Image: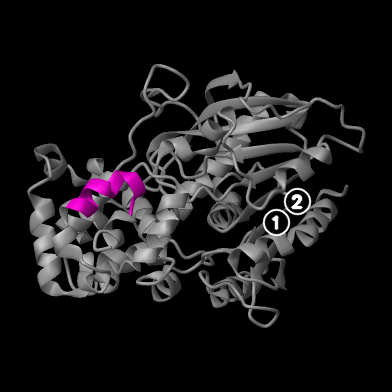
Amino acid sequence: MATKPVAVLGGTALAGVGAAVAGIAGTATALRSPSVVRRLNSWAARRLTAAQRADRHAAILPTPIPGPGFYSDPGDLSDRANGEIVRKQYVRPRVPIPGATIHRFMVRSTDTAGNAVPVTATLIEPNRPWRGAGARPVVVRNQPINSLGLKAAPSYRIERGLYVDVPPLLPLLLAKNYAVLIPDHEGPRMAYSAGIMAAHAVLDSVRGMRRISADLVESPMVMDGYSGGAIATVWAAQEQPAYAPELRFRGAVAGGTPTDYALLYRRMNGALGSGLFAAATIGQAREYPSMVELFDDFAFYVTTLIKDLPQPPLAAAGIARIDLDVLAAIPEPFESEIAQDVIAANKPGATAPTMPILLYHGTKDKFLGDQFIPEEGVLELAASWRSKGATVDYLPVPGEHLIAAGWAMPSVLRWMRSALGD
């Protein structure tokens, strides 16, 4: 029993850690003891390699997908335009998607710091002709990836038949004969929860889609995303007027949206949501390298072990009720200038989208309420955007985080159809 609070952090990847610190960690409560934390840091420091010490940021980046194939390093992209196609290929998934042609492609995009980076996306286009008015509609589906490893990206999982749609809208959208674009919106560093990177990845994926399929250049488009995918959606909607003004969207739908990491810290840190909160902190550190200074040796070493994990073990780590405060290199790390700058930079609302928006969220006024993502954050965002002239609908729905996603599906589909004029 003594190893479980540590081993659960990363499933099999941390089994060795759990065994090694069996006599040190004890329980999650023990991790709050300064003496235990000192011993854990000392233990971890002896296991760090010279390369990890020399470049702590590089040490927490995801492991590249091996081989010379589609995901290989494209080299210098600085001379290319945003959205320019780097490479493309047809995909035949192990679990087929009947009646559709699937393109996987890589484009040039821009990271949070303004550097050129490659971004990948998948376009699923029905083979049936579009019989409606105008061009075939496109739904940009920002899947909640919520993972740290590159093999969790939608483009990789679709090919291998491992893709899980949350909430399960993809079959319904294809049944409507819409095209569906699924960006790998965490970017090349799997920067989970980093808003600007996600926005650029989404918008440049749309630019690439228009180069891949001339039939979709004039298509009416909407964006959609839930939870981690909602981060990408609200940021893409907010950044579109400045970053990609040539793109025209009929609207964007975002549900269960994390908007304020100060709120998430109070709700998730040290609680059942702590596994994903820790993963989001790692994701932010990949885009904001100064954050690595806040990781003490044990937290840093554990990060190097879990840096390629998908969502399920990261979410399960919440059982340990991880308190990042006690694993940090400084007291009250979330009050530090580094953390406060990152929190401010990832809080949407400073500028307003020009496209119509539907926000929805599980509310305790209906039933239960979202237990992980506070509703007050999305209400504040709606008010901020409205004050700047944006058209924002808000739909409170019953249920906690997962129930709310399913409950809202009929309303989301109706709103999309109306926005697309279908």
Q: Is residue 329 left or right of residue 404?
A: left
The disc at residue 355 is 1
> Identity of the amino acid at label 1?
Met
Q: Is residue 411 left or right of residue 77?
A: right
Residue 243, x across and y down, in percent: 54, 46
Is residue 261 shown to the viewer in this render? yes
Q: Which residue is mark 2?
A: 250
- Label 2 and label 1: CA atoms lie apart by 6 Å
Specify start and end residues of the magenta stretch as a single range: 9-19
> Identity of the amino acid at label 2?
Arg
The residue nearer to you, when weighing 408 against 420, is 408
* Secondary structure of the residue carrying numbered label 2: loop
The 10 Å Cα crowd at callout 1, few under 14, some 14 to 19, many 20 or more, is some
Magenta highlight on residue 16: yes
Chief secondary structure of the magenta span? Answer: helix
Residue 192, x across and y down, in percent: 43, 51
The 10 Å Cα crowd at callout 2, few under 14, some 14 to 19, many 20 or more, is some
Residue 196, x across and y down, in percent: 46, 52
Please tell me in which quadrant of the rendered image residue 296 appears. bottom left
* Secondary structure of the residue carrying numbered label 1: loop
The residue shown at (44%, 70%) is: 264
Residue 108, x across and y down, in percent: 48, 31
Name the residue at the front extreme.
1
Query: Which quadrant is home to the N terminus?
Result: bottom left
Q: Earlier in the sequence, mark 2 or mark 1?
A: 2
Compared to residue 164, the image places residue 328 above or below, namely: below
Asked if the residue at tag 1 contacts the one at tag 2, i.e. Cβ–Cβ closer than 8 Å, the answer is: yes
